[in-house]
Amino acid sequence: MNQHLFKYLLFFVLSACFFSACKSDVKPAKAFVKLNGKTMGTTYNITYQGGNKINQTDIDKILADINQSVSTYIPNSLISQFNSSTTGITIEAKPVALTNLDLKDLSLDYHFYRNMAAALKLYESSLHFYDPTCMPLVNYWGFGYKPKKAITDIDSLKVNEMLAYVGLEKIKVQSRGDSVLYSKTHPSIELDFSASAKGYGVDLITQYLINQGVENALIEIGGETRGIGVNKQGKPWKIGINTPDPNANVSEFEYIVELSNQSVASSGNYRNFHEVNGRKYGHEINPITGYPSQNQLLSVSIISQECLVADAFATAAMVLGLEKAKTLIENNKDLEALFIIGDGNGGYELIKSSGFH
């Protein structure tokens, strides 16, 4: 055999063996897994890749406990106990680090404590326009846990009376070792975390997945969404912002955002509203006036790292209106926003904060 030909064949065989060996050492990427279920009066959807011992039963347990803690629709939940009491409640609140913790074993007290602690901060940073003590007003206008009905005869004296016990500063917080007392300054004070609880649930499930070794995932509860890592194409997660029209299908989108280790939450009045004498009023209640917000905003989508924060600020922005909400968002370096307003002719105008892209 020709010496050069022999060397060529030897090189070819050795190269084939080398690449074959390399190929056998490369582990195929794990497939993305999808989970879905019901929680908080809505649905959840989770897509993730990798991780160790991801158990949907654990996820359902975490979400069920959050519900049992902060749902006003459950008569014996912790928040319902607070709302029905005349003086308030005391809960255990031991600080815990969520990293590497078995989150399904968190107490109901802990979930209430974390939602309340977040509310106290967000109440201040939102200029008091995120206010979970709006519960009596939400019920009055027919959007709360009491029977939903449109108000056909507005009692302004009643609204003013309820404003006397709206305001988070009217709940006094006293730490007593490992417990916290939340006391009412008025027996009629009630709490409602519906503007942030879904975001809190998204954040907690995200932490559960991270604790289990998941690096790529998309977590969504009732439209509030958080993405970590990348999708199966190796790119940021893409989330659609719904067309703000009550007749539009939920799969109709006005804009697509990309999430890279971020959250997005949206709020709008175009689906949840009452109509009286040809006039619509939505479920976003202004905690300062006591009346449903009336402004040009159809929807607001907030981007933040934490979904709870995005959830709460989306509600606050809807109440504030476009100009004040834009100012609030621009003054907070951790937030970006997409505002959608009607153009008066059935079309929509999209307005973005300076860092939204």
Image: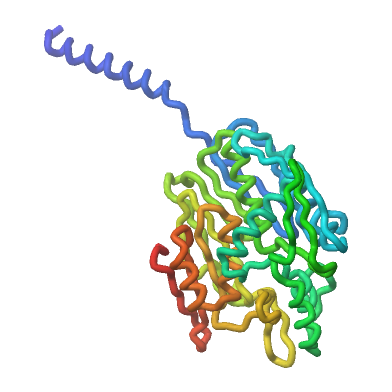
Q: Is residue 229 left or right of residue 48?
A: left
Q: How many marks?
A: 0
Place of residue 235 in the rendered image (x, y in percent of width and height, measured from the top left): 42, 48
Q: Is residue 24 visible?
A: yes
Place of residue 343 in the rendered image (x, y in percent of width and height, measured from the top left): 49, 85
- Residue displayed at 63% across by 80% down: 293
- Residue displayed at 49% across by 79% down: 348
Place of residue 72 in the rendered image (x, y in percent of width and height, measured from the top left): 80, 61
- Residue displayed at 50% across by 60% down: 303
Q: How is the image coloured?
A: rainbow
Snapshot quadrant of residue 246: bottom right
Front-most of 338 and 96? 96
Front-most of 257 and 301? 301
Q: Is residue 295 left or right of residue 149?
A: left
Place of residue 247 in the rendered image (x, y in percent of width and height, measured from the top left): 63, 77
Q: Is residue 50 above or below residue 292?
A: above
Front-most of 15 and 263? 263
The quadrant of the image that shows the N terminus is: top left
Front-most of 274 and 19? 274
Snapshot quadrant of residue 73: bottom right
Q: Is residue 108 visible?
A: no
- Residue displayed at 53% across by 55% down: 263
The quadrant of the image that shows the C terminus is: bottom left
Q: Is residue 193 above or below residue 97?
A: below
